[in-house]
Image (cartoon, rainbow, N blue to C red):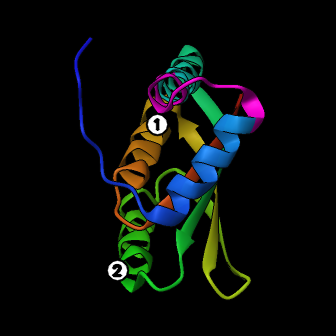
Amino acid sequence: MTIISITIPSELLKKFEEFMKTRGYYSRSEAFRDAIRSLMTEADLAKMETGNVAATIMIACNYARKDADLKMTELRHEFDDVVIENIHRHIGEKYCLEIFIAEGNNNRILDLIGRVRGMRGIQQVRAIFMPL
């Protein structure tokens, strides 16, 4: 197997290690491999939908990262052909929750999700697809 090195915030690592214990993972590596497999499976399932879909995309980001908020605004404008609604809410004192409701070409919506996942400051992204 190939060895890689990653950098994650200490708070996320602490949560991840607690998660590992509750799920019974024997090592960080196995837990990370499982997380990567789950993310790839989610992406593969989303790709199975073809043509036009409706999607709800939930994004959690750190409130302190103002650059993430600015980049999110840029993406909303860039993808205004598929984003039909956007909700922005503060969750506690630390996080912002963005909800995009999208409708249109599945590949275009997957492109939006990929761009969001690639942004710094994003904590979590979840998407639900419904064929139209």
Q: Position of residue 40 (x, y in %)?
A: 48, 23
Instruction: State yes or no: residue 51 in magenta.
Output: no
Q: To which residue does mark 2 refer?
A: 67
Q: Nearer the viewer, residue 100 or 41?
A: 41
Q: Which residues are magenta?
A: 22-33
Residue receiving disc 1: 110
Q: Secondary structure at mark 1?
A: helix
| Residue shown at the point (74%, 83%) measured from the top left | 92
Residue 63 x %, y %: 53, 82
For residue 88, which numbered disc appears in the image? none
- Can see residue 102? no
Q: Residues within 10 Å of mark 2 (few under 14, many from 20)?
A: few
Q: Residue at x 57, y 24 (%)?
A: 38
Residue 72 appears in the rendering: yes
Lateral position of residue 103 relative to residue 11, left or right: right
Question: Magenta stretch mostly in which secondary structure?
Answer: helix
Classed neighbour count for the residue bearing mark 1: other residues with Cα under 10 Å, few (<14), some (14–19), many (≥20): some
Q: Is residue 102 above or below residue 50?
A: below
Residue in the image at 48% along x and 31% along y: 32
Mark 2 → mark 1, Cα distance in angstroms = 22 Å
Q: Amino acid at mark 2?
A: Asp
